[in-house]
Amino acid sequence: MKFPTLNQMRLPAWHHAICATTALTLFSLTGCGPSGPPLGQIKGTLTMDGQPVKNGSIEFIPEGGGRPSLALTNEDGQYEVYYLPNVPGALTGKHRIRFEIAKAKPGDPGLVRPKRNGKSVGVTLEPSIVDVASGDNEVNFKIVDAT
């Protein structure tokens, strides 16, 4: 038995209309809205002794597992958290916070650590645990003596 080739098979016009309508219906049902895990938007300021800290890197590490989010502070110590490039936010839930302060350029002293008895002392970030809720969150961090 010989089967016709695709060129030999002619489908009726109504078949094309049904296929197009089905494709458009499926596309409209899927929508164009955001997808992915639930995120909370986080903004705030990083300070030390009441002064803004520039060039700060703040990492939000989910305690339940998952992708961490990152924020970088500007000249005014302000930051916004990003889950992915151009995707602001962090996973909802509790996060452990890690931070670093970078030098903006050669010769920049970076973070000037507090001194006690002439020696630099360690610092920590407060709060060190953050609970991210869906929607907008404001979290202001302070760098304080680790003692």
Image (tube, grey):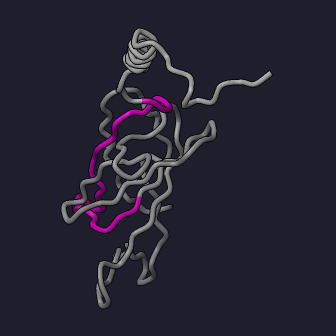
**Residue 82, magenta (yes or no):** no
**Magenta span covers which residues?**
35-57
Q: Residue at x 63, y 30 (%)?
A: 5
Count of labels shown?
0
Q: Is residue 80 left or right of residue 36?
A: left
Q: Measuring from the top left, give residue 76's x and y in whole percent.
A: 19, 60
| 120 lies above or below 78 | below
- Residue at 35% across / 74% down in the picture? 111
The residue nearer to you, when weighing 68 against 3, is: 3
Residue, far bottom: 107
What residue lies at 37% left-to-right and 44% top-to-bottom? 87
Tell me the quarter of the image containing the N terminus: top right
Which residue is pictured at 48% across the width and 32% down the height? 36
Asked if residue 58 lies left or right of residue 105, the reply is: right
Judged from this view, the residue extending furthest toward the right is 1
In this rendered view, identify the residue nearer to me: 66 or 141.
66
Q: Position of residue 137 (x, y in %)?
A: 32, 34
List x then y, in percent, for residue 44: 28, 46
State which quadrant residue 139 falls in: top left
Q: Image quarter for residue 100?
A: bottom left
Q: With 2 as the anchor, is 125 left or right in this view?
A: left
Residue furthest to the front in view is: 1
Q: Is residue 119 above or below residue 35?
A: below
Magenta span main SS:
strand
State the image coordinates of residue 27 (x, y, percent, origin top left).
41, 21
**Relative vertical location of residue 101 with respect to residue 21 in this rendering, above or below:** below
Q: Is residue 46 magenta?
A: yes
